[in-house]
Amino acid sequence: MELFFRMHGTGEPLIILHGLLGSSDNWQSLAKKFSTYFRVYTPDLRNHGHSPHHDKLDFNVLNEDLLEFIKRMELSEINIIGHSLGGKTAMNFTLKNPDFVKKLVIVDIGPWYYDVIHDRYVDSMMKLDLESFSRREEIDIAFSRDITNPAVRQFLLKNLKRDEHGKFAWKINLDIIKRNLPNLGEPVVSEIPFPKPALFIAGGKSEYVKPKDIGDIQSLFPAVRIVFFENAGHWVHADEPEMFYKTVTEFLHENH
């Protein structure tokens, strides 16, 4: 599948993979900052953003999409940042294709099985009769009945677009995502660990990664450094953008 992507800067390649219900658009501010030192690629995962829609959605096809993208861009010695679903995709890809990856950064996700927890967001998005709204503010008000956190609402509403008739529609393939959510909770498994440098950044206010989980991460990524941003939630890079940028940039520049 030919993924839509944005690109900034020159230098070593850095691929940033967004999370579930997100898109490359969520990462543009940080991508431009990282482009001071790197050629930054921010693709949209299948069924997200501007990338094609497809009935199949699991880590096998996400891995294939990323490998196809890397070969199309003729990349090697890649640095990868992955958040949430993008982080699990990055882990899967790296363990299966270690020769392509130089350094790995995973943001607030672990390699273990997760129960489906985004289903309420998907259900709330699907409930909205978008054609009945003429202004984005009206959608936000209606959405607030289910999603009370304004930051989460704004994140989800980035998936809005206008169709050819000027009506609101979702860019994201909600039906397929809903159907395949159980696939996206599957654990990352590998008999061979990734021996190169890895950095895991977790939100102290998030439930996705806890200190007790460090051993499971180290079993797959023995050269890992794990950092908790105590005041950040699941969207660590949005809650603490300056600290995130500094931590990741220092890690990518280190000689290991």
Image (tube, rainbow, N blue to C red):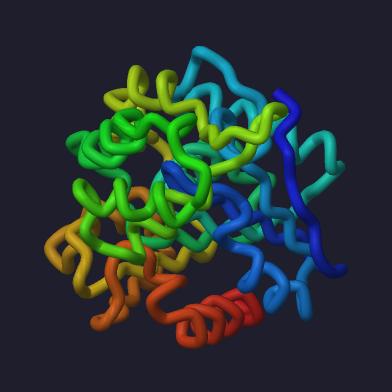
Q: Please tell me in which quadrant of the rendered image residue 125 appears.
A: top left
Quadrant of the drawing holding the C terminus: bottom right
With 16 as the anchor, is 220 left or right in this view?
Answer: left
Residue 180 in picture, x, y percent from top left? 36, 21
Residue 51 in picture, x, y percent from top left? 66, 33
Q: In the image, what residue occupies the spot 21% across and 41% down?
A: 117
Residue 102 in picture, x, y percent from top left? 65, 59
Regarding residue 194, the answer to whether it shows in the image is no
Q: Work out whether 30 lies above or below 95.
A: below
Q: Work out whether 34 lies above or below 140.
A: below
Q: Work out whether 211 lies above or below 239.
A: above
* Of 51 and 208, the residue lying toward us: 51
With 158 as the anchor, is 224 left or right in this view?
Answer: left
* Of 176 and 69, the residue lying toward us: 176
Q: In the image, what residue occupies the spot 59% across and 33% down?
A: 167
Q: In the image, what residue occupies the spot 32% across and 54% down?
A: 141
Q: In the image, what residue occupies the spot 65% across and 31% down?
A: 163
Question: Outermost residue toward the top?
Answer: 55
* Of 145 and 183, the residue lying toward us: 145
Q: Please tell me in which quadrant of the rendered image residue 88 appears.
A: top left
Number of marks present in the image shown: 0
With 210 as the anchor, is 235 left or right in this view?
Answer: right
Residue 80 in picture, x, y percent from top left? 60, 56
* Of 140 and 112, the residue lying toward us: 140
Q: Work out whether 66 lies above or below 178.
A: below
